[in-house]
Image (cartoon, helix red, strand yellow):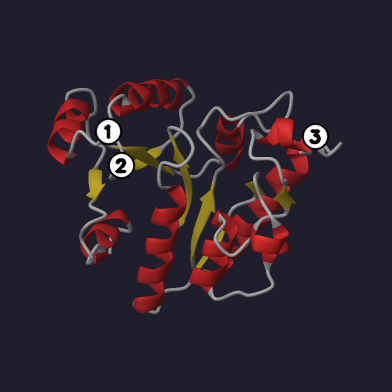
Amino acid sequence: MKSYFITSTGTNVGKTYLTKLIINRCKELKLSINAIKPIISGFDINNYQDSDTGIIIRALNKNNNIDKISPWRFKTPVSPDSAAKIENKYIDFLKLREFCEKEIKQNILNDSYLLIEGVGGTMVPINDQYTILDLIKFLNIPIILVIGSYLGSISHTLNVLENIKNNDIKLDSIVISQSNKDDVGENLTINSLSNHIEDIPIYFLDRNKNNKNHIIDQILKL
């Protein structure tokens, strides 16, 4: 399986940062890859280049493909259910699921890597019935869980892991994206998590190091 759902413990943790690194590495190795972020809030069409969607589009070099990357876009930077209500819209979960499943099937046909980037954390509400966790369950593809190294991240991570376990979701790996604020460091974070996690690889992305290819290669099992 070369399809992965990239999710996290919350917003602004590093999902898009990891997505971009994986895309760049695949392109360097001439490996086929596609990525989507179906839902995005806080999106300004007049200044989208620095948004998560814009970053993915630039990395893929797919200009003018906003609708193919992020069909559900909302201006207000709040949870998708709330952002949709502000615009008098509603996110149809079935259509969202079908959009993602179509990309997964196409990915299998093309023998390509596919990254589906979630919005916020695993329990972000999509509408009044479904959350991101529900979408992950229906798609049934392994997740890469992006977490921070900030103070409190371990508790947040263990809560997500408990939820994942209770829902029989396959966890492929955990990627620690170094936090800019309240960073407790690589060793403390990994050592603490390792006491509660078995047989799941944990990787650390040091933002101060330029060459992260060896980490991405391990994540992709190259």
- Left or right: where does residue 216 sit relative to residue 133? left
Q: Which residue is mark 3?
A: 86
Q: Which residue is mark 2?
A: 179
Relative to residue 177, is residue 52 depicted above or below?
Answer: below
- Residue at 22%, 66% in the rendered image: 211
The one nearer the camera, 219 or 138, is 219
Q: Which mark is residue 153?
A: none
Marks 1/2 in contact by CB < 8 Å: the verdict is yes
Q: CA distance from mark 2 to mark 3?
A: 31 Å
Marks 2/3 in contact by CB < 8 Å: the verdict is no
Q: Residues within 10 Å of mark 3 (few under 14, many from 20)?
A: some
- Left or right: where does residue 5 sit relative to residue 65? left
- Specify the amino acid type for callout 2: Ser
- Residue at 28%, 45% in the rendered image: 178
Q: Which residue is mark 1?
A: 182
- Specify the amino acid type for callout 3: Ile
